[in-house]
């Protein structure tokens, strides 16, 4: 019966079997030390003579657990017998037991099948798994239904730019930029509250530490709201749940990155700053009037929020109409929309959507759109749609900012950018 | 403060506000009855005089709850005041309060934005949401990590057939048929146990009640197994968890379809039939020797299992090598692979995979493949990969068979088939 390395300490002076990868080998002639890595952690195994296998070989070892305060974790296994389940080549593309920070990002991604073995990198994706879980659980607890919508669409939600084309039998379709229209259809179906965890695609040529061409969008949409403020309230609750889950389940992973998370009180302090006021803050900080909020402005706003409100995050709301898609619910010349900036990066965009058919008919031509071109989307509103809104959180960006990663690409298992389509 | 219709009964003789859709209207001159639908159910609201709005209009009604045994559910609301939040067009593309079985599948899908409002159809997707949840929870409870892998890949996992091509900047990529290679990379990373809930694409021209060109694949992969039997055991546990969750959370939805679910004892009785024996059973049943297991054969096998084992499901294992992909782990001329047939339909394919590098080098040319063409996939095995295997459950097929739907397309929110790419 296999025992996980993290549980070995409960079996002192008894014989157990562990299975895993030879993470680090030291052969000293009469004796060899092998650090065996499994999904739960690592333990030192002591072999008589040479180990006779290579780094990253997968082994099954039977032996007696004993205390040794010099061993990592304070315990080790004295091997009585072992099998090599898979012998690794002596030439590895990357030193799996090395520090990923000493390897270039390109090398980590070019050799992704192997760099994923580096414990520090696996921590990133354990954290990501918990984010997904906590996001879903917190919404299910509020009576949200999880949906899965098509990623092959006839047209884009924000117009025809930035779309990847798919050859679909004898025709063409596009990869969805977001499940926006589908979320709205489901809210208006009477489901009222839906969320989706799914891929989103942007055919943008940006190649920056904040862009991915394929990312995971954590999408939320709910009916019977009055304004964007209920959505911001909802997002605060989700973030509290996510951070609580990470503290409970991923303390070691967070420690690897020296990551700390805002507590509930700090989250409640996240300011809500109107777009115009936000520009004033940025202008005042730089001593130069700004006419837009660019990535540098997002960093400035978070710095301001940290100093003034003690939290490295800020909502920006009340964006002007021309800055938002046609479906943003107007409020004079502004819209009931918001972004959430977290640690200097926009991680969420959302807002109340237009739900009244007449208002939508009025809005479309202002954006160069026609009801005919919108197709079945118009049915949602023609047939009775409640006030509603929603938002989307970028999973990789949230992961990046939680752990303090330099590039969002580090937070994607197999990132896709303009040049990278493999592995 | 809004009260959900399902909670109205707790407020008898008190005034509450409900919000929802005018599901059914009866205007009798001096009085009108409106069945108001929200996410939780429906309640009858009584208005003095004409209601003055249309079917599917979204309203907010304030009124007093009273008992009325003639009302659906035994309670109704006497309206004191109401607002029309969104007036619906009097011409709906479908009668939302009608029976979807009286509308053709094409009409339901052509008008999907509105057919999703039909309560019976919403039940399908509430069930699906619970399946997703229970699948994820049962695996997390066994120390599995949820992963999200790219759906844009350089080549297919099973060779070059059946792939959709994506124009990707100046080059081309394909939509992933499965996360097979990525699951294997993550198992071999030391993560050991992973699952993914994600889209999968098959560019097959089939247009049948069992095919979708885009579907949601519930993928599982785990290390340190001996054979396909541990995988079948794991799947039995997942099915028990899914069915238990559905019984607990979706009893009404199941009742709408008259759906019953096998209990744990029945699931434990699911037989494991070798491929050759399965063909013999089908041959004996039809009185004619068969050389393959086609959809009719799958139905025959489930009939046989129901009669012989009291469960409408069967595993088929030990498929011959030429029936499975190159990565199936060989066992003589057979493979350690399996399918699960449930109520006459294959809902799962899986098996142990080749993990030894030398064995893989031996297998590839038998399938017309070369190590060079496999690219980074080979790194997984060259660098030490434990014995492992996994499987994938088709979410829509499982939903279809749980509810007894005629077509798998009914179990997809926005199905994609050869001709259908909108809405």
Image: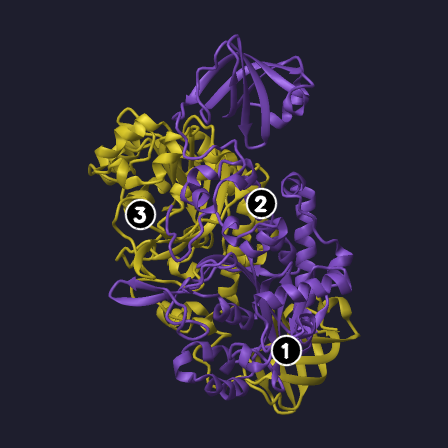
Chain colours: A purple, B yellow
Residue beneath label 3, please? B156
**Is B286 left or right of B31, judged from the image as shown?**
left
Image position, residue A145 (x, y; %): 57, 60
Q: State left or right for residue B382 relative to residue B225.
A: left
The C terminus of chain A sits in image quarter:
top left
Residue that label 2 marks: B137
Alpha carbon separation for disc pair 1 and 3? 52 Å
Q: Are marks 2 and 3 on the same chain?
A: yes
* SS state under label 1: loop
Task: Give the spatial CA distance, label 2 vs label 1.
Answer: 51 Å
Question: What is the chain identity of the residue bearing mark 3?
Answer: B
Image x and y of residue A345, in percent: 60, 61
Q: Which badge, 2 or 3, is on the more N-terminal residue?
A: 2
Number of numbered callouts drawn: 3
Q: Position of residue A204 (x, y in %)?
A: 42, 65
In the displayed structure, B199 sits above or below B52; it is: above
Is the C-beta separation of discs 2 and 3 under 8 Å? no
Q: Residue at x 51, y 74 (%)?
A: B97
Q: Please give the chain letter of the residue carrying mark 2.
A: B
In the image, which is nearer the foreground, mark 2 or mark 1?
Answer: 1
The secondary element bearing badge 3 is classed as loop
> Which residue is depicted at the point 27% across and 67% down?
A171
Mark 1, residues whose alpha carbon is within 10 Å: few (<14), some, or many (≥20)?
Answer: few
Q: B103 or B412, which lies in front? A: B412
Question: Is residue B173 found left or right of A260 in the rendered image?
Answer: left
Q: Quadrant location of the N terminus of chain A?
A: top right
Residue B219 found in image quarter = top left
Q: Looking at the image, can residue B86 be seen?
A: yes
Q: Which residue is mark 1?
A: A289
């Amino acid at each position: 019966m296999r025992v996980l390395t993290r549980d070995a300490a409960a079996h002192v002076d008894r014989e157990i079997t562990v299975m895993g990868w030879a993470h680090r080998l030291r052969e000293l002639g009469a004796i060899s030390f092998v650090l065996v890595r499994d999904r739960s952690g690592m333990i030192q195994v002591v072999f008589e003579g040479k180990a006779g296998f290579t780094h990253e070989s997968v082994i099954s070892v039977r032996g007696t657990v004993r205390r040794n305060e010099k061993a990592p974790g304070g315990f080790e296994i004295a091997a009585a017998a072992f099998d090599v389940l898979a012998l690794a080549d002596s030439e590895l593309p990357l030193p799996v037991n090395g520090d990923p920070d000493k390897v270039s990002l390109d090398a980590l991604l070019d050799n992704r099948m192997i760099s994923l073995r580096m414990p520090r990198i696996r921590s990133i994706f354990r954290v990501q798994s918990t984010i997904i879980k906590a996001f879903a659980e917190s919404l299910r607890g509020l009576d949200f239904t999880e949906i899965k919508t098509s990623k092959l669409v006839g047209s884009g939600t924000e117009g025809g730019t930035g779309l990847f084309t798919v050859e679909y039998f004898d025709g063409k379709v596009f990869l969805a930029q977001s499940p926006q229209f589908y979320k709205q259809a489901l809210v208006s179906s009477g489901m009222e509250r839906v969320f989706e965890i799914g891929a989103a695609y942007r055919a943008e040529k940006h190649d920056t530490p904040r862009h991915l061409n394929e990312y995971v969008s954590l999408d939320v949409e709910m009916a019977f709201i009055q304004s964007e403020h209920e959505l911001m309230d909802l997002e605060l609750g989700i973030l509290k749940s996510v951070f609580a889950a990470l503290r409970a389940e991923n303390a070691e992973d967070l420690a690897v990155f020296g990551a700390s998370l805002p507590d509930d009180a700090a989250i409640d302090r996240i300011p809500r700053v109107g777009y115009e006021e936000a520009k004033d803050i940025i202008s005042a900080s730089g001593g130069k009037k700004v006419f837009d909020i660019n990535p540098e402005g997002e960093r400035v706003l978070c710095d301001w929020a940290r100093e003034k409100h003690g939290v490295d995050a800020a909502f920006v709301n009340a964006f002007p109409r021309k800055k938002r898609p046609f479906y943003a619910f107007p409020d004079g010349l502004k819209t009931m929309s918001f972004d959430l900036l977290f640690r200097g990066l926009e991680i969420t965009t959302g807002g109340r959507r237009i739900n009244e058919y007449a208002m939508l008919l009025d809005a479309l031509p202002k954006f160069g759109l026609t009801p005919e071109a919108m197709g079945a989307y118009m049915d949602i509103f023609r047939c009775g749609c409640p006030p509603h809104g929603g938002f989307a959180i970028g999973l990789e960006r949230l992961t990046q900012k939680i752990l303090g990663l330099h590039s969002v690409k580090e937070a994607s298992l197999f990132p896709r950018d303009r040049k990278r389509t493999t592995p």
